[in-house]
């Protein structure tokens, strides 16, 4: 943190910081003036309740006068700060007027504390506590620019010089008391500048973070748009390559070696097309909101599982356990099918032939839960923190050699979060993996 003892805030953000700290100063005036007014009321109540007189407390008449003065003046500061806060503006004229009110209130607090030191003992250098407290309160609570701090410090010193002769007449005591006041004013200047520097540093750091967040958000959006365009444009050359390979397969004089090459071309095109589809899905999910439909999840899941059981017959056994009653949630059927297809595909990829995959649907008063559990090879513990990352380093081929790009589970989490839900995973080596989705519950 750079300490701005004799400098102003950086020019680039000075206007914004001034607008910010003037508003905070006004709010502080409101709070402090209200507390001070309540404190004065309590003192007045004690005076009357205990019938205090000059015989019980020295200089009680001066305390009484100061108390009535505060009770009359403080509400004006509260009302003025309240009005300025409610109708706050950032133009220079308004800020100068508002900060003048803050400085005036600060001087009032310091003067009251200064007089309290005189009331306690006519030689204030023997009782500097109240004077010092007033300076500390103003230095800590309020934010002043360099020239404003100088003004408050000089004004405080001058007020002390003017008031002191009413209580002290000895030249040596006048000098000593003014030296004590100078020491306190210097301490006030240092405290005020330190807290100004601290607040300015925090303000500019927060503004820099906000600016970086905006830049990151814009860059992320631009990246997704470019990703979508590039992925979309890659489809055409792949389609041409695949069409050319299909025409070559139809030729009668194609030998076995060429057929093998053509199959490799087709497989590579299919793999590239799958990657492109995943990239497009990722970009689309980040850029667009989903339209949700209130859906009976039992019917929805049953249809998906029936289709998988039909297409993957003999590879795995897919078992489904419903909630025993209709369960509804707001989902985008197309996107949520992508989630289930991905999770079931992963479960099959890492399960042995005729292994079971268990899918269950359950609910509570406010949430529904979909669980996809396999009993395959599981996920190593060191990979678990990364499985939902885009292009995850936790990706690996299936037990039958199925390739993985590392986008599938990232897309799954992306879709679930956009539905207002969460997804969690638990796994152990050689005992299988369980994915649990939670979604907000709706009603028919």
Image: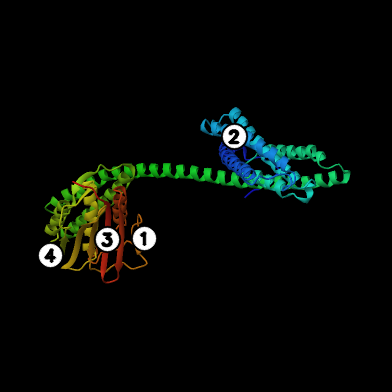
Q: Secondary structure at mark 2?
A: helix
Q: Residues within 10 Å of mark 1 (few under 14, many from 20)?
A: some
Residue 318, image x, y percentages? 16, 62
Q: Are marks 4 and 1 in contact (CB under 8 Å)?
A: no
**Mark 2 vs mark 3, CA separation in Å:** 62 Å
Which dot marks residue 314? 4
Q: Secondary structure at mark 1?
A: helix
**Mark 3 vs mark 4, CA separation in Å:** 23 Å
Q: How are the colours assigned in the image?
A: rainbow
The residue lying toward the viewer, choosing from 265 and 286, is 286
Which dot marks residue 75? 2
The residue lying toward the viewer, choosing from 236 and 25, is 25
Chain-order first, disc 3 or disc 4:
4
Count of numbered tags: 4
> Label 3: which residue?
435
Q: Quadrant of residue 49?
A: top right
Chain-order first, disc 4 or disc 2:
2
**Mark 1 vs mark 2, CA separation in Å:** 60 Å
Residue 213, image x, y percentages? 46, 45
Chain-order first, disc 1 or disc 2:
2
Indicate which label's residue lies in the foreground, 3 or 4. 3
Residue drawn at the location 16% of the way across and 52% of the way down: 326
Chain-order first, disc 2 or disc 3:
2
């Amino acid at each position: 943190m750079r300490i701005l003892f004799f400098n102003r805030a950086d020019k680039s953000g000075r206007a914004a910081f001034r607008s910010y700290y003037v508003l905070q100063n006004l709010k502080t005036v409101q709070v402090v003036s209200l507390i001070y007014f309540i404190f004065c009321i309590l003192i007045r109540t004690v005076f009357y309740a205990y019938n205090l007189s000059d015989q019980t407390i020295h200089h009680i008449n001066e305390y009484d006068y100061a108390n009535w003065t505060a009770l009359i003046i403080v509400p004006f500061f509260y009302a003025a700060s309240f009005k300025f806060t409610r109708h706050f503006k950032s133009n220079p004229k308004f800020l100068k007027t508002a900060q003048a009110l803050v400085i005036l209130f600060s001087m009032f607090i310091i003067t009251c504390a200064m007089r309290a030191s005189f009331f306690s003992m006519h030689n204030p250098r023997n009782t500097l506590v109240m004077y010092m407290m007033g300076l500390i309160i103003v230095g800590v609570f309020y934010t002043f620019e360099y020239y404003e701090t100088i003004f408050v410090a000089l004004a405080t010193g001058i007020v002390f010089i003017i008031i002191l002769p009413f209580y002290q007449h000895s030249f040596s005591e006048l000098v000593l008391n003014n030296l004590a006041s100078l020491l306190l004013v210097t301490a006030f200047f240092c405290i005020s500048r330190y807290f100004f520097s601290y607040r300015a540093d925090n303000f500019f750091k927060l503004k820099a973070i906000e600016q970086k967040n905006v830049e990151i958000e814009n860059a992320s959006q631009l990246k997704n748009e470019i990703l979508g365009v590039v992925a979309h444009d890659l489809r055409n050359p792949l389609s041409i390559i695949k069409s050319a390979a299909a025409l070559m397969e139809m030729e009668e004089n194609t030998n076995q070696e060429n057929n093998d090459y053509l199959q490799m071309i087709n497989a590579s095109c299919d793999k590239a097309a799958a990657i492109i589809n995943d990239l497009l899905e990722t970009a689309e999910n980040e850029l667009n909101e989903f339209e949700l439909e209130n859906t009976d999840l039992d019917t929805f899941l049953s249809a998906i599982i029936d289709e998988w059981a039909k297409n993957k017959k003999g590879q795995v056994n897919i078992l489904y356990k419903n909630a025993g009653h209709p369960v509804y949630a707001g989902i985008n059927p197309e996107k949520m099918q992508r989630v289930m297809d991905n999770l079931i595909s992963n479960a099959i990829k890492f399960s042995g032939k005729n292994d079971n995959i268990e899918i269950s649907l359950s609910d509570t008063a406010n949430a529904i839960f979909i669980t996809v559990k396999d009993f395959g090879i599981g996920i190593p513990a060191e990979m678990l923190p990364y499985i939902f990352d885009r292009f995850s380093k936790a990706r690996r081929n299936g037990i039958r050699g199925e390739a993985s790009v590392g986008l599938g589970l990232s897309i799954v989490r992306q879709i679930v979060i956009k539905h207002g839900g969460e997804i969690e995973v638990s796994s152990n080596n050689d005992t299988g993996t369980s994915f649990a989705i939670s979604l907000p519950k709706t009603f028919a």
